[in-house]
Amino acid sequence: MAYTKYRVDKVGARKKRIEAGAYIKSLRLAHDPKITQRALADTLKLGYDTFISQVETGTARVPPEAQVAWARALGVDSQEFAKKLLSYYDPHTHKAIFRKGK
């Protein structure tokens, strides 16, 4: 039987989502200091800006299927953006894939 349970660090995961949100907000403001959450939501064709706020405050995550669109909207390389988000949202997988050595 496969082992399907693993320890979840809810506090650590929340902290990482907050860090991811700060990263995304910094990208938004660096891309265009005047771009609002509403404008980003419009670019992403979301229809509402509350989701942008939720992502930036760490209460929501950028869905994997939307990461390329978010990267384009923020003016960054989509592969680097996805790697960075993986480091926040799933640090164990990020470590297994991208860190050399042990």
Image (spheres, grey):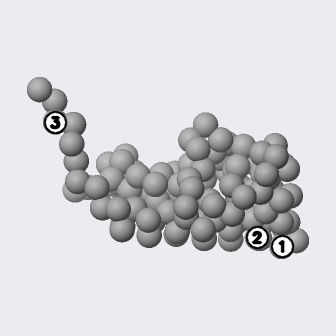
Q: Quadrant of the C terminus?
A: bottom left
For badge 3, the amino acid type reads Tyr
Q: Which tag, 2 or 3, sits closer to the chain's start?
A: 3
Image quadrant where one finds the N terminus: top left
- Comparing 101 with 71, the one in front is 71
Task: Say whether residue 21 is left or right of residue 70.
Answer: left
Q: Position of residue 96 (x, y in %)?
A: 32, 48
Q: Element under label 3?
A: loop
What's the amino acid at mark 1?
A: Pro
Q: Where residue 30 is drawn, which disc sits there?
A: 2
Question: How far separated are the C-alphas under marks 2 and 3?
Answer: 43 Å
Q: Which residue is mark 3?
A: 3
Image coordinates of residue 37 in percent, x first then y, are 79, 62
Q: Is disc 2 in contact with disc 3, using a CB cutoff of under 8 Å?
A: no
Q: Residues within 10 Å of mark 1 (few under 14, many from 20)?
A: few
Residue 28 position by quadrant: bottom right
Q: Quadrant of residue 15 in the image?
A: bottom left
Q: Is residue 63 left or right of residue 74?
A: left
Residue position for label 1: 33
Residue at figure coordinates x 68%, y 68% from the top left: 25
Q: CA distance from mark 2 to mark 1?
A: 6 Å
Q: Residue at x 63, y 45 (%)?
A: 67
Side of 93 relative to 89 (left or right) = left
**Which mark is nearer the camera, 2 or 3?**
3
